[in-house]
Amino acid sequence: MKVLWLGHAAFILTIKDTRILIDPFISGNSMAPVKVSEIKNIDYILVTHGHADHLGDTKAIALATGAKIITSFDLGSKLTEEEGGLNVIGMNIGGTYIHDNIRITMVHSFHVTEPSPSTGFIIKSDEGCVYHAGDTGLFGDMKLFGRVFGIDVAILPIGGYFTMDIPQAVEAVKLINPKIAIPMHYNTFPVIEADPYIFKKIVEEETDTMVIVLKPGEEKEIILEK
C-alpha cells in the first residue's frame, strides 16, 4: 500500500492496482504539489464533506478520469444535480462499499457542514486498514473504530481551529491505537499553523504508534507485518 499526500486533507492511496483519491482540494491549495490536470488514473474519489477545502476539485477530476465518487447520499445527490456525467455512489454512515478485496466504510466525524453530516472513511484490504478522519474534533467512538476495524494507519487533523489540535490528536491516537499515524490539515492557512514534529514527538513518547510526517507530494510505501 502506498500513501501520497497532496497537502491539506488530500491523499492518494494505492492499493494494488486501485487508486483512491480522498478530499481533492488542489485548486486554491498553496500546498498542493500538482495541478488538477496532472492527476490521472484515479478509480475512486472519497469526499468526507462538502466544504470547499475537501470537496475541492472532485467534479473536474471525476469527469477527466472517469472515477467514481463515494460520498454521503445528500452531498452525492447535490453533485449529480449540479453536474451531469458524474458517477456517484451515495452512502450513509455505517455503510460499506466493496471493490474487489477493498472495503470502504463511511464513519461519522464531529464537524459542522451542509448539506449532510461530515464523515470519515475506513479503507480495509489485505494490505492493511487506513482511517482518514476527515475534519473532526475528538470523540470517544474513535476507540470503537480501532477495536472494530483494527486500524493500522490513522490519518488525523492536527491544525486546530476547525478540527482537533495537537493535544487532542494525541488523545485520538491513544483511543485508536494504530500502528502508524499521519498528520494532516495543518499549515494550509495561517489559522491552522501547527508543527507536525511536536505531534510526532509526543505520540512516540507516550504510545507505541509511529508517526510518519509527509511533505506535500511525498509518497510512502507502507508494508505491515501480518
Image (cartoon, rainbow, N blue to C red):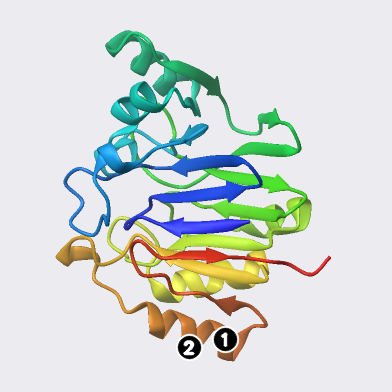
Tell me the number on the disc at residue 201: 2
Q: Is residue 93 left or right of residue 34?
A: right
Q: Where residue 183 sits in the image (x, y, percent)?
A: 44, 67
Residue under the point 25% across and 67% down: 187
**Dots 1 and 2: beta carbons under 8 Å?**
yes
- Mark 1 residue type: Glu
For label 2, the SS is helix
Mark 1 — residue?
A: 204
Q: Could you tell me if residue 134 is visible in this image?
A: yes
Assign the C terminus to one quadrant of the image: bottom right
Residue under the point 24% across and 65% down: 192
Q: CA distance from mark 1 to mark 2?
A: 5 Å
Q: Is residue 81 left or right of residue 12?
A: left
Tell me the number on the disc at residue 18: none
Q: Residues within 10 Å of mark 1 (few under 14, many from 20)?
A: some
Question: Observer-nearest residue: 162 or 3?
Answer: 3
Quadrant location of residue 36?
top left
Quadrant location of residue 50?
top left
